[in-house]
Amino acid sequence: MKAFTVYPWYAWAFCAAGKACENRTWKPTLAHGEWVAIHAGARKLGGARHPKLGELLDLVRDAEAAGLHVDVLEFGKVHFAMPSRDPESVFDHAMYDDATSPRSAIVAVAQYLGTSQGIPMPWGHSTGYQWRFTSVMPLARPVSIRGAQGLWRVPGVAVAKIAGQVPEAVMRGENNGR
C-alpha cells in the first residue's frame, strides 16, 4: 500500500470535513481504484510564540471554498459546519483542535479516482494537479509511523495495523463497485 503525507489539519479534513482531493504540483503514480493511506505529518500550526497564521488561513480558505461554514474559536481550534447528509438535520458539525490532532500517523485510507487539472472542485486549487478520492475511511486507531515526501510504501507492520481496521476488500485492492 502506498501513502502520502499531508499537514495534520488536512488529514483531519479528509476524515471529518469531506475533503476528497489533494493538491500537488505533480501527477501521482497511482492506478484508478487503488487504495492509498493518508498520513498526518508531524507539523503543528504553532502557538502563541510562533503562530503559523498563514497555514490556518489556508485551511479556512479551502474549507470555505468547499462550501463549509468556518469559525476560528481560538488559534488552532476551528469549528466547521457543513451541509448534512441526514435529511433530519441541516448541518453536520466538526471541530479541528490542533492540540489533540493525530500527528506522524496514518489516519485514513481512501480510494484513488484519478487526477484532474484546473477543474473546480471542493478543496481543489486551480493550479497543479488535484488527486481525487472516494470512500475515505478514517481509522479508529491512527497508526503511528514516520511519513515521507512524495508517495511512499507503507511498511508491512503498519499495513497489518491498518488491515485490522478496514474491510478485507480494501486490503485486497478491490474496487467495491465504485
Image (tube, helix red, strand yellow):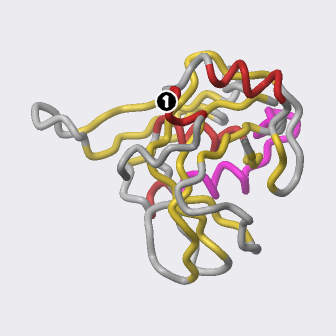
User: What secondary structure is marked by label 1?
Assistant: strand
| Residue 120, quarter of picture | bottom left
Residue 45 is one of the magenta-drawn residues: yes
Q: Quadrant of the N terminus?
A: top right
Badge 1 amino acid: Met
Side of 10 relative to 42 (left or right): left
Q: Count neighbours of disc 1 (C-alpha within 10 A) and say few if under 14, some if 14 to 19, many if 20 or more.
A: some
Hey, which quadrant is residue 32 in on the image? bottom right
Residue plotted at (65% across, 41% down): 9
Q: Reply yes or no: does residue 169 show up in magenta.
A: no
Residue sitting at 50 percent across and 50 percent down? 19
Furthest residue toward left: 88
> 49 and 33: which one is in front?
33
**Eyeballing the image, is 161 above or below 12?**
above
> Seen in the image, is 84 located left or right of residue 78?
left
Closer to us: 165 or 41: 165
Residue drawn at 48 percent across, 80 percent down: 119
Rendering coords of residue 8 (x, y %): 70, 38
Determine which quarter of the picture holds residue 97: top right
Q: Is residue 45 left or right of residue 22?
A: right
Q: In the rendering, at what x and y percent does residue 43 appear?
A: 83, 39
Relative depth, front residue between 165 and 143:
165
Residue sitting nearer the eye, 27 or 79? 27
Which percent across, then down, holds residue 6? 73, 47
Above or below for 24 versus 13: below
State the residue position of label 1.
Answer: 95
164 versus 133 height, above or below: above
What residue is at 53 percent from the left and 62 percent from the top?
A: 132
Report the label total. Answer: 1
The residue segment tinted magenta is 44-62
Q: Position of residue 53 (x, y in %)?
A: 73, 50
